[in-house]
Amino acid sequence: MNIDPNDNLVEVRNLTKWFPVQRGLLAQVFGGTRRFVHAVDDVSFEIRRGEVFGLAGESGSGKTTTGRAVVGLTPVTSGRVIFDGIDLTTLGGTGMRSLRRAMQVIFQDPMASLNPRMSLGRSIGYGLEIHNPEMDADARRAAVVEMLERVGLAPANYFYNKFPHQTSGGQRQRAAIARALVTQPELVLADEPIAMADVSVRALLLDLMNELKRDFNLTYLFITHDLATAKYICDRVGIMYLGMMAEVAELRELYTHPLHPYSQALLAAVPVPDPHQRRTQPMPEGEIPNPISPPTGCRFHPRCPIAGEVCAQEVPAFRELRPAHRVACHYAERFLPSGD
Amino acid sequence: MVTTPGGGKDTLVQIRDLSVTYHTRLGPLSAVSGVSFDIRRGEILGLVGESGCGKSTLGRALMRMVAPPAEISQGQLLFDGEDIMAYDGEKMRDFRGRRVSMIFQDPLTSLNPVQRVDEHVVEAIQVHEPQTTIRVALNRARTLIQTLGIRANRLRDYPHQLSGGMRQRVMAGLGLVLNADLIVADEATTSLDVIVEAKLLDEFKRLRDEFNLTILLITHNIALVAQIADRIAVMYAGQMAEVGDVVTVFDDPCHPYTEGLLRSVPNVKLNEREVLYKMGGEPPNLTHPPMGCRFHPRCPMAMPICSAEEPALLPVVGDVEHLVHCWLHQPQTRGAEAQA
Ligand SMILES: Nc1ncnc2c1ncn2[C@@H]1O[C@H](COP(=O)(O)OP(=O)(O)OP(=O)(O)O)[C@@H](O)[C@H]1O
Ligand SMILES: Nc1ncnc2c1ncn2[C@@H]1O[C@H](COP(=O)(O)OP(=O)(O)OP(=O)(O)O)[C@@H](O)[C@H]1O
Ligand SMILES: [Mg+2]
Ligand SMILES: [Mg+2]
């Protein structure tokens, strides 16, 4: 499918999500300042219709929180999420319910979307029961059987009656994919969907997701902490660090010309499965800071090898330095290939 | 150097015909069956294979850490030439603490939550060297923790106050402080972010280089093995499929399982392995493993003999260091596929 760079299915504008920190009893009695986890801060990006947009970054960087906000599963602190022209952040419960069908989720653990006491067939049909209540039982069963076949759970009538514990992890994830796709959504949030699977199963699931995307004209928001996996499915990638968006670009562009020192470190850290290409670059010092009181200025500055004075003082603007390639770093010009 | 059956000077552990059986409700499950290989002094040996193939069971069996329902049903374990299967309970406990140390995926489960880091280190020293005073032990702890890149004031922290990467290093440190010869790291980096993982791998390499430590790196992440291991051992369904030098095996895998596995691993480098190999089928149920070679139902190269008789783990032609458990490489049938 051709992707039109001006046809945005999702627009995320200055998305911010803070979680209040649970306070101890003393703090509640004596007051004091309320503290927050800065899970997502002023993040903007868009997802084009028909593309796979990848969100990558280390644990706690805010990928899941961003993803949940995009599909309207979490109220935002500020900012806007526009889905197909509709602002989800101002939409009431009824409006949201009618959009739910169009946005489905695949989780890392397939059991998050399968009921252990229901057969796979019933679990998959359950979404249809909710979103298409007018559909009769026979039609629903037919739709589920067709979907089982599509995700490679054949013979479908055999798998229809299986319970989750009677199947392998890979088969369960296929069933979870079937459950997400049976309502014919437009956007699928896939949050680390293959992280629990074995290497051999991962390759099969990635292939399946690519195929289904093509056949059903889907758009994916694909969350992963693994940039090697992202290479096989994502069209564009956003790199998050401590609640901020560090860099967004088309995947090949980002992997060849990473402009943010954090993206550079993250890419260099990915182990290459080739003993002739062993990493020699040192890794950034220090640990990821506490998201309750993130560093001032650029949040990466305490670990950044090229940080200057301005980095501790000013939040870097998220700016376009190469075509369709945006980065939030005061010194990113240094990494522009000569000729730019 | 050729590994003689008696074990050369460079051999630390000899595993001979080792089998571990779990007695389950569905009958005996042969998690490890008839496995033989050597671990050489000062090497990093990577042990890989799909989930459930017996890596952890094998790793624990090396220390005879198997409890009912599991049992070492046959085999020999020689550590520095000594038959540790003959050790009594007390000798075995002392051996475990002093000579071998294990790092698990989540060291929080093996560190005592109400004991500070220095107390762990001192206890570990005093259990095995009762004559050492607390002061000497503390000094050793301080020196060691700094070598591992953790500030000495962290010694007063409780395990939960450390980051995941620091906890892993403390565990490795506990092994080191006793001058353990062998570290068994079972998925030790699996829950870590790539940057922390990369730092821990650097640490493993440094420990090996500086202290001539021997490390058995158990992982499902084959890329890690490519990055730091000297040799690789590939398991399939409780058996050793292939063992050899890491460069040789990556460049020229002999077992069709190894070949498929390596070709299904994502590679972050652009223009390298743009398409992942999709291995069909699933590992067998180990209560009823297939006849003959256990891989034959999934093997693209299977011959009639493969489903009838089991091959032996033998050197490939021209390389005594490279062992493979496959009918394509047995003297009786070598080159058979070329004629077929
Ligand atoms: N419900 C919540 N209440 C409080 N804090 C939260 C909540 N959900 C997430 N957080 C915090 O928000 C930050 C971002 O979390 P998030 O789960 O979005 O990260 P992530 O990038 O998905 O991480 P991972 O790779 O571990 O899944 C973290 O510091 C996390 O602890
Ligand atoms: N306590 C147990 N009781 C019965 N069977 C067990 C037990 N522990 C493991 N097994 C079985 O033994 C086999 C080997 O398990 P093991 O945990 O050693 O595999 P592994 O290679 O470490 O897998 P993973 O990559 O998932 O850690 C598996 O088939 C598993 O189901
Ligand atoms: Mg997450
Ligand atoms: Mg294991």
Image (cartoon, rainbow, N blue to C red):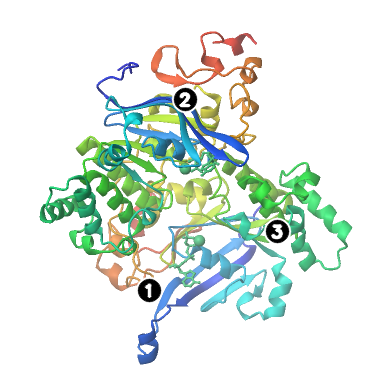
Q: From this viewpoint, is residue A169 visible?
A: yes
Residue at mark 1: C-beta within 8 A of ligand 1: no
Q: Which residue is mark 2?
A: B242
Q: For mark 1, does the 10 Å Cα neighbourhood hold few (<14), some (14 to 19), or many (20 or more) residues?
A: some
Q: Which residue is mark 3?
A: A117
Which quarter of the picture shows residue A179?
Answer: bottom right
Q: Measure the C-alpha gap from mark 1 to mark 3.
A: 40 Å
The residue shown at (11%, 56%) is: B135
Q: Chain of mark 2?
A: B
Q: Picture coordinates of residue B119 (x, y %)? A: 23, 58
Judged from the image, the secondary structure of the residue bearing numbered disc 2 is strand
Say what amino acid the circle numbered 3 marks: Arg
Q: Chain of mark 1?
A: A
Residues at discs 3 and 2 in contact (Cβ within 8 Å): no
Q: Picture coordinates of residue A197 (x, y %)? A: 56, 46
Q: Nearer the viewer, mark 3 or mark 2?
A: 3
Out of A15 and B88, give the one closest to the viewer.
B88
Q: Which mark is residue B212?
A: none
Q: Which mark is residue A292?
A: 1
Instruction: Give the left or right position of residue A40, taking residue A177 as reference.
Output: left
Q: Picture coordinates of residue B261 (x, y %)? A: 53, 33
Say what amino acid the circle numbered 1 marks: Ile
Judged from the image, the secondary structure of the residue bearing numbered disc 1 is loop
Instruction: Give the left or right position of residue A285, taking residue B242 as reference.
Output: left
Q: From this viewpoint, is residue A265 visible?
A: no
Say what amino acid the circle numbered 2 marks: Glu
Q: Picture coordinates of residue A196 (x, y %)? A: 54, 49
Q: For mark 2, does the 10 Å Cα neighbourhood hold few (<14), some (14 to 19), or many (20 or more) residues?
A: many
The residue shown at (88%, 62%) is: A136
